[in-house]
Image (cartoon, rainbow, N blue to C red):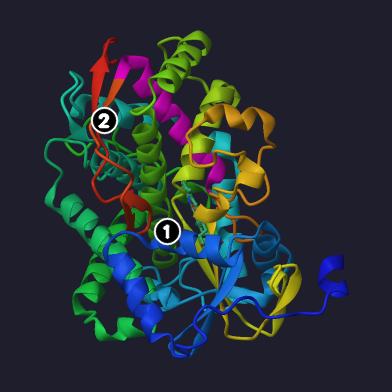
Amino acid sequence: SNHLIDNEYKSPPLLNTCDCLGIIRLVKLIWHYQRSNVCQYTDHLFKMYGHTYALNLLGKQIIFTHNAHNITRVLSTGFADYFPAGNSGTLFSHATPHGIFATKNLNEWKKKRKALQTPLANNREICDLNILERHVEKFLRSVPTDQEAFDIQAKFADLCTDIMASFALGVSTNQLGSTPSAPNKLFVENLNYIKSVIARSGFLGPLHHLIPKRRFRIACDDARNYATVHVNEQLESPGNFSDGNGAEGIMRPSLFLRRFDRDTHDANKLSSHSLSILLAAVDSMATMLSATFFLLAQDERVTAKLRATILENVGYGQPTYEQLQSMEYLRFVLNEAMRLFPAVPFDARVATKDTLLPYGGSSNGMSNVLVRKGTLVMISIRASHRLSDIFSDKPDEFYPERWEGLQRDPPGYLPFLQGPRACPGRRYAMTQISYIVIRILQTVSNIEGYNRGEWKEKFGFGYENANGVIIGLHRDFPIKG
Ligand code: HEM
């Protein structure tokens, strides 16, 4: 903050002085987007122009930054000066009218965030490992384990959908079962369609109005109806649930819904909250798992070491909650996967008033930057995760041991974001994912990687590999059950 007060402000390098409308820059960005090359392109611009630069696009100024002080300013210390960018709030209001993503201002967001506090607060209680075990067993039975190549990314999407629907609605969508019912199948198709439209619209900005939204609205209505039916079941029959042996699998009290106060027992509101959790969690968890196995498949040493620590500390049985919190090397591996492939590679905020960023102005990047009201600030989380001054001289390498010398959340490391709007599901996600990785590695002695080449970026609600994550597993220990 001293730096902010002491310094006069200067402009950051403006990339397109001769192309003031930014048409050429926009065409370039679209070109790179279509080639799955946006991250490489924006990283290249950082290398050329420094940690903070500006662009004019269609008359609007956009500031790109990966400077840790600027990021902290936008997300934490200057939080009240910014609001999430774009049209997504409006689109979310069709899918989840009462949910946390359908907010137009800070006060509305604060109320919704508060409503989520209690249901997500007690991590030990909301992580029911016996329910999780049943999903993982289904997963292990549904994938080949004789080295045959398959796309584990698609399977993780199914697994995470089932887990999160159980958590948020009390019913498994049964994507990993042999025949999901027609309503479950339709619900998941609708969710995927809703996510694809919202993600695409985020990139199109104001041009998203050109996309017809009829099918989107129908998908939102259907998804909400499905969620409301299950919320009502939960409200009407507390404690009276089948034990999960029916054709559709698990039907239990939703660990999420049963923690809401009685006076918020309004099925419309609750179904919005449940759907918001499904939208927030499924793709980010699937990205994190996929990135982990993509990297393990290329690194026999890390896989063997991780498996050895798991067998030494947990053996072949179900890990306990305490064990999940204390597996240090596993945490290093997961940190490293999220560092290289964060589920949210960019985050966009709009300045709601004239404000300042501490660094990026003048040619050496050391002066304050004036951020006019309406300016879009794009934080590149992916670029910030690959800075050599924090992550050593080989930041593009997968090397979990680097975390031995790093603090838990080093500056600029923000896979779950930071500040008041950071992910409230972080501990839940880490616990679930740790459990899943342990259970897989207990049964599997070798992971063969069949992907050729790099991770090909595909932006959606997560950060997928457009080529899938093609691996072969070699099982050497039987699955329970
Ligand atoms: C590996 C898994 C996950 C990652 C990497 C992740 C990451 C993130 C990030 C980066 C954000 C901020 C997005 C933004 O504001 O632009 C976010 C928000 C959010 N996440 Fe997660 N998340 C994960 C799992 C979960 C889970 C399991 C839940 C729920 C149980 C959850 C619930 C939420 C909610 C409700 C928000 C919105 C918070 C707000 O706007 O105040 N997330 N997450």
Horizontal relation, residue 16 to residue 402: left or right: left
Element carrying mark 2: helix
Residue at figure coordinates x 63%, y 75% from the top left: 82
Task: Residue under label 2, please give it.
Answer: 139
Element carrying mark 1: helix
Q: Could you tell me the amino acid type at mark 1? A: Cys
Q: Position of residue 180 (x, y in %)?
A: 15, 43
> Callout 2: 10 Å neighbours few (<14), some, many (20+)?
some
Is any atom of residue 201 visible in this view? no
Is 441 part of what is drawn in magenta?
yes
CA gap, disc 2 to disc 1? 32 Å
**Does mark 1's beta carbon lie closer than 8 Å to ligand 1?**
no
Magenta residue span:
425-446
Task: Residue under label 1, please give it.
Answer: 39
Nearer to me, 32 or 193 = 32
Q: Could you tell me the amino acid type at mark 2? A: Phe
> Callout 1: 10 Å neighbours few (<14), some, many (20+)?
some
Q: Position of residue 413 (x, y in %)?
A: 60, 48
Is any atom of residue 307 visible in this view? yes
Q: Position of residue 400 (x, y in %)?
A: 53, 29
Q: Position of residue 268 (x, y in %)?
A: 39, 67
Q: Are marks 2 and 1 in contact (CB under 8 Å)?
A: no
Labels 2, 1: front one: 1
For the N terminus, the image quarter is: bottom right
Sequence order check, earlier mark of 2 and 1: 1
- Position of residue 306 relative to residue 84, above or below, is above
Horizontal relation, residue 99 to residue 230: left or right: right
For the C terminus, the image quarter is: top left
Nearer to me, 353 or 336 = 336
Is 20 part of what is drawn in magenta?
no
